[in-house]
Image: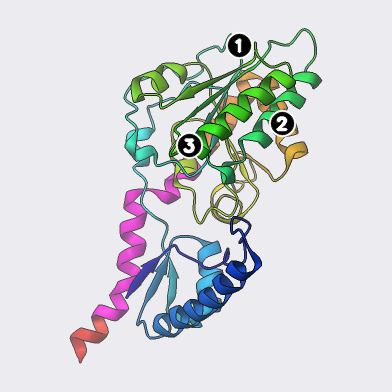
């Protein structure tokens, strides 16, 4: 039996390599590794994947669709139901929110004086902070003069000197875009500091391209936050789907679409936000711990029954 969320979809995304020779070696290596991975996986009696996107790739590689079951990862949605993370928009990039401590109980529908956009991610190249900055600048330029001016906060950490240089370039770009009064950086912010910055709104943006599942999206939906996620993989195929014909969030895939989505959630009336949040909370229940246990048992029961009878 195998439970996997790893796919070799990005083998060919070799932009970070420095030479054609290294590119070629990497392609050969991953081609061989992919073949071995598929050969071993095809011997499994049961394979469980964590999303529809992952299932499509595992079906292609392992070629055992009848034995490949989609089992969504468990999310403690029940404990998140009474918690409201009070920020306007949040960009999430593959951040492990289980490492953060969110315990502050915030009232649903707390009025937001000034829209705040929070971007949480390490300052790595694939996190596309510059795209966020450009989209934010475009949003500020489009907003009506009588609208409250939003603020963008980057919250993240630097792994090395390259990340520090990248952060410095972002700050320089901020000045070029005349965003000094609308944007700030919080490097290596502690949980408590992040919690304080979170008490300002209730919309969320995730822009992790081809994210296998996106459990952080589920966590915030369960908390009553309106999500905007990247229009790909888990968020597109499994999470941000209509519930009883009603929206549970928004999807976008480029600067123009993100700008439009950000403007929508910033301008959104409180009644509309609460309606979407309520639907999103209900939809998040399909990813609860109880649902995971039910699906897991349903997947392994035929295997256990076969072993018992033999």
1 or 3: tag closer to the N-terminus: 1
Sequence-first disc among 2 and 1: 1
Element type at marker 3?
A: helix
Instruction: Give left or right: position of 175 versus 103.
Output: right
Q: Main secondary structure of the magenta part?
A: helix
The residue closer to the viewer here, 173 or 38, is 173
Local crowd size for mark 3, using a 10 Å CA cut-off: few (<14), some (14–19), many (≥20)? few
Cα–Cα span, label 3 and label 2: 26 Å
Q: Nearer the viewer, mark 2 or mark 1?
A: 2
Q: Which numbered circle lies on residue 114?
A: 1
Q: Can you identify the residue that label 2 sits on?
A: 135
Q: Earlier in the sequence, mark 3 or mark 2?
A: 2
Marks 3 and 1: in contact by CB < 8 Å?
Answer: no
- Looking at the image, residue 301 sits to the left or right of residue 162; the answer is left
Which quadrant of the figure contains the C terminus?
A: bottom left
Task: From this view, report whether residue 291 is shown above or below residue 171.
Answer: below
Highlighted magenta segment, given as a residue range: 282-304
Note whether 186 is above or below 40 in the view shown.
above
Q: From the viewer's perspective, tell me whether residue 65 is left or right of residue 248.
A: left
What residue would you read off at disc 3? Answer: 161
Q: How far from the left and from the top, in percent, is residue 75? A: 37, 46
Which mark lies nearer to you, 1 or 3?
Answer: 3
Residue 163 makes an appearance in the image: yes
């Amino acid at each position: 039996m195998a439970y996997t969320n790893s796919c070799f979809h990005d083998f060919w995304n070799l932009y970070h390599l420095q030479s054609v020779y290294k590119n070629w070696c990497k392609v050969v290596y991953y081609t061989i590794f992919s073949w071995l991975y598929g050969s071993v996986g095809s011997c499994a009696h049961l394979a469980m994947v964590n999303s529809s996107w992952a299932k499509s790739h595992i079906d292609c590689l392992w070629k055992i669709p009848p034995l490949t079951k989609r089992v969504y990862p468990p999310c403690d949605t029940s404990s998140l139901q009474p918690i409201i993370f009070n920020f306007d928009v949040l960009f999430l990039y593959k951040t492990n929110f289980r490492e953060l401590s969110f315990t502050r109980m915030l009232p649903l529908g707390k009025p937001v004086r000034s829209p705040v956009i929070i971007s949480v991610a390490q300052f790595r190249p694939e996190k596309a902070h510059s795209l966020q900055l450009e989209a934010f600048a475009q949003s500020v330029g489009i907003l009506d003069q009588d609208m409250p001016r939003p603020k963008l906060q980057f919250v993240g950490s630097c792994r090395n000197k390259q990340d520090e240089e990248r952060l410095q370039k972002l700050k320089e770009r901020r000045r070029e875009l005349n965003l000094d009064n609308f944007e700030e950086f919080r490097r290596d912010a502690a949980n408590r500091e992040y919690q304080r910055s979170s008490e300002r709104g209730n919309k969320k943006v995730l822009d992790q391209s081809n994210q296998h599942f996106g459990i952080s999206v589920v966590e915030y939906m369960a908390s009553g936050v309106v999500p905007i996620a990247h229009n790909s993989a888990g968020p597109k195929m499994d999470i941000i789907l209509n519930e009883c014909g009603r929206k549970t969030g928004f999807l976008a895939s480029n600067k123009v679409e993100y700008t439009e989505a950000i403007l929508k959630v910033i301008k959104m009336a409180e009644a509309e936000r609460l309606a979407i949040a309520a639907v999103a909370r209900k939809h998040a229940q399909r990813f609860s711990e109880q649902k995971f246990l039910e699906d897991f048992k349903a997947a392994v029961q035929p295997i256990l029954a076969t072993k018992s009878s033999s």
